[in-house]
Image: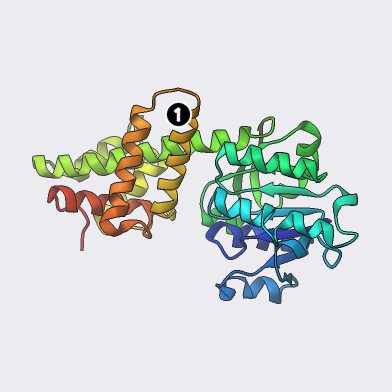
Amino acid sequence: MARIGFIGASGLMGHGMAKNLLAKGHALALTVHRNRERVADLLAGGAREAPDAAALAGPQFGCELVFLCVTGSPQVEQAVLGARGVLAGLNAGAGSAATGLVIVDCSTSEPDSTARVRQRCAEAGVAFVDAPLSRTPVEAEAGRLNVMVGATADDFAKVEPVLRAFAENVFHMGGPGAGHTIKLLNNFIAQAICTATAEAFAVGQRAGVDLRKLVELISLGPVNSGLFQAMAKTLDGQLDGLKFELDNARKDVRYYTHLAEGLAVPTLVGEAVHQSLALASALGHGRKFVPSLVEAQEQLTGARLVRR
């Protein structure tokens, strides 16, 4: 069993991950964000509270692995490189440097930022592995996430057994950075499906067709997917069929278009999806879940879509 630090256990995904690490017998130390209620059960179950990220790598906790599950690259950089970040704890005494500390970033982060953080970690003798997630908070609680790992073969061998505490499927996507890159491709495709569905619903309703017939048709054909079904539930008034904050989706697609821009690859669809999400956020839906793209279409087009 490993000594594990966790940053982001109060999040929708992080809580389930931390819960399963603890249940599998790992010694767990947490940094606690503002929402203490979200981690109260973890602390009651034996997790220890660390005052900050630096303490996780310091002599008091001496973590062998530190997991990050935070919003995005700015938060990752602060947690690792900040004045009280993980690397700062290595200077606090005989911390984890001698044990081969590995930092595992399960956030959806920007590959360029990940490369910079990895370099700084390497200079400190620390391995930095990108291991973003797919599936939902329901699977996180059940220990059935998918994890896509970018790492050297040696680092993958170190982290895979621990990842399986909360993951049903662990994919070694390639070398360092491959995990975050593939996660951005995955999320772009996902949000393209969601934004296209919301737009099609608005056009169909304004054209006077029965949208339930559209759902019936797609449900029995090759266009069907879990994402389409989550969006279809909005017609019955259910706006939480996909528990993923719209502003986080907007951030992920922005990371995707930035990645493509750096490669000089045109992303006509990517930019359209990003702007659709940005518009929905500007209309007041950013803190809601992605299916509220349908509510944004109602405001834009006058269509009546969500049963109320």
- Measuring from the top left, give residue 237's x and y in whole percent: 27, 59
- Measuring from the top left, give residue 146's x and y in whole percent: 60, 43
Question: For this view, does 7 lie left or right of residue 63?
Answer: left
- Whether residue 170 is visible, yes or no, is no
Question: For this view, does 280 lie left or right of residue 304?
Answer: right
Residue position marked by numbered label 1 in the rendering: 261
Which residue is drawn at the image coordinates 17% and 49% (left, top)? Answer: 300
Image quadrant in which you'd find residue 157: top right
Image quadrant in which you'd find residue 208: top left
The C terminus is located in which quarter?
bottom left
Image quadrant in which you'd find residue 20: bottom right
Name the residue at the front extreme: 83
The N terminus is located in which quarter?
bottom right
- Whether residue 297 is visible, yes or no, is yes
Near mark 1 (Cα within 10 A), the count class, few <14, some 14-19 or many ≥20, is few
Residue 194 position (above or below residue 223): below
Which residue is drawn at the image coordinates 65% and 48% (left, top)? Answer: 105
Which residue is drawn at the image coordinates 55% and 33% (left, top)? Answer: 182
Amino acid at the residue labelled 1: Glu
Element on which disc 1 rests: helix
Q: Nearer the viewer, residue 42 or 296?
A: 296
Q: How is the image coloured?
A: rainbow
How many dots with numbers? 1
Question: For this view, does 239 lie left or right of residue 127?
Answer: left
Q: Nearer the viewer, residue 50 or 24?
A: 50
- Measuring from the top left, give residue 45's x and y in whole percent: 72, 73
Q: Nearer the viewer, residue 96 or 204?
A: 96
- Measuring from the top left, give residue 231's x and y in whole percent: 32, 48
